[in-house]
């Protein structure tokens, strides 16, 4: 039993650091005196996880027009990490003079909100977001005689992680809302065991997924007082793996590949008993998962039967600068046939 627990804990750490904490593989994670410090890495230093796609991608990405030369900072949503891992090498090979550098915020955690703030402050050439722009961000841009534009490039599903020992068939959207507003605090109220629910989330002002979840799933101004806020998805996954009553949510590519939790099926409000799985086939944990990883059910995201989906955006500041040109070129690469193929390989749904 101890050997099995050690293996699962190892998988939590390796997969968590490799994907959710994967921004640390894309950027050098530095701590100086206990505070975050900004750090960068060129896209040309990253290797693709899908080598078979590289020749096709490089050839088709090379057809994108009006790609500026230079070194361009970008940042934002950590949901995008799997896309970085599949796309950046192809971009670097197709356009060696178009250099990308992921940039962390000088304080706080990386995320959609912090990326848009950095873009407005002139620290980034463009940013990546897992939520739509909000009115206050448009207002800030207008006051500086510019405007922000969001360019959708992919569709993502949000998966909910629970402890694999939790005996419950699935959750409806209304039940998820009740959990995260504090209206339901025990799994027995949802047909499960007599066990307190411990709900986890990232801060909405930092994480686009948390803001999207609050606005469009919870449909409330704030989360319930029962929700505990954590800094990153690695921590959220670990908490749920260790707590029988825990629940956390994140982008499906960040959840479904985990071996220590269960990505619970979800039902829409219109079909409350039709639980749709965000994964394909049989869910695996422990050694079974290590030998054969769980895979994302992108088909249900594409067809819309899975109720928790959203779009991912490249955010550009329309001011006529070379930074705007860089953001638009990057979006065009992702929207090219090769870029959309790589987005699918990363676990997301293409929009073209």
Image: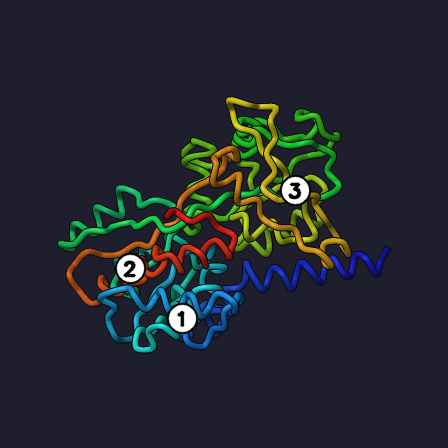
Residue 106, given in percent of the width and then of the height, sits at 38, 66
- Residue at 36 percent across and 58 percent down: it is 334
Label 1 crowding class (10 Å Cα cut-off): few <14, some 14-19, many 20+?
some
Which callout, 3 or 2, points at the residue further toward the start of the chain? 2
Q: Residues within 10 Å of mark 3 (few under 14, many from 20)?
A: many
The reply, left or right, for residue 301 in relation to residue 321 is: right
Sequence-first tag of 1 and 2: 1
Cα–Cα span, label 3 and label 2: 35 Å
Residue 181 position within the rendered picture, expressed as x and y whole percent measured from the top left? 52, 31
Residue at the farthest right position: 1
Q: Position of residue 236 (x, y in %)?
A: 59, 50
Q: Secondary structure at mark 3?
A: strand
Q: Earlier in the sequence, mark 3 or mark 1?
A: 1
Q: Nearer the viewer, mark 1 or mark 2?
A: 2
Q: Which residue is mark 3?
A: 162
Q: CA distance from mark 1 to mark 2?
A: 14 Å
Estimate the spatial distance between the alpha carbons at disc 3 and disc 1, rounded to whole Å: 33 Å
Q: Which mark is residue 38?
A: 1
**Residue indicated by mark 2:** 119
Q: Are marks 1 and 2 in contact (CB under 8 Å)?
A: no
**Nearest the eye: 298 or 247:** 298
Q: Residue at x 78, y 61 (%)?
A: 6
Residue 64 vs residue 103: left or right?
Answer: left
Dividing the picture into quadrants, the one containing residue 69 is: bottom left
| Displayed quadrant of residue 165 | top right
Q: Residue 328 at x, y = what percent?
A: 26, 59
Q: Is residue 281 left or right of residue 222?
A: right
Q: Secondary structure at mark 2?
A: helix
Residue at position x 55%, y 40% in the image:
227
């Amino acid at each position: 039993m101890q050997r099995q627990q050690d293996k699962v804990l190892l998988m939590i750490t390796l997969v968590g650091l490799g994907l959710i904490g994967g921004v640390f593989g894309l950027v050098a994670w530095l701590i100086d005196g206990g505070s975050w410090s900004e750090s960068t890495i060129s896209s040309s230093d990253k290797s693709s996880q899908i080598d078979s796609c590289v020749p096709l991608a490089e050839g088709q990405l090379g057809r994108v027009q009006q790609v500026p030369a230079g070194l361009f900072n970008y940042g934002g949503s950590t949901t995008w990490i799997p896309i970085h891992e599949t796309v950046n090498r192809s971009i670097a090979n197709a356009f060696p003079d178009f250099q990308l550098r992921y940039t962390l915020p000088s304080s706080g955690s990386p995320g959609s909100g912090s990326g848009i703030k950095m873009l407005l402050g002139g620290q980034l050439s463009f940013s990546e977001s897992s939520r739509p722009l909000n009115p206050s961000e448009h207002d800030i841009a207008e006051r500086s005689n510019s405007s922000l534009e969001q360019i959708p490039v992919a569709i993502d599903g949000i998966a909910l992680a629970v402890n694999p020992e939790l005996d419950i068939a699935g959750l409806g959207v209304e039940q998820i809302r009740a959990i995260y507003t504090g209206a339901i605090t025990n799994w027995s109220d949802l047909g499960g065991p007599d066990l307190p629910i411990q709900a986890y989330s990232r801060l909405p002002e930092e994480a686009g997924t948390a803001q999207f979840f609050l606005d469009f799933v919870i449909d409330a101004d704030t989360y319930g007082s029962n929700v505990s806020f954590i800094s990153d998805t690695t921590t959220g996954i670990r908490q749920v793996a260790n707590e029988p009553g825990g629940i956390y949510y994140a982008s499906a590519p960040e959840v479904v590949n985990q071996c220590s939790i269960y990505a619970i099926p979800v039902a829409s409000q219109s079909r409350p008993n039709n639980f749709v799985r965000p994964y394909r086939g049989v869910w695996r944990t422990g050694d079974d998962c290590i030998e054969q990883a769980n895979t994302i059910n992108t088909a249900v995201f594409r067809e819309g039967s899975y109720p928790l989906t959203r779009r991912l955006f490249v955010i550009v500041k329309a001011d006529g600068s070379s930074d705007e040109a860089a953001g638009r070129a990057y979006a065009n690469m992702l929207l090219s046939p090769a870029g959309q193929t790589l987005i699918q390989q990363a676990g997301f749904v293409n929009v073209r």
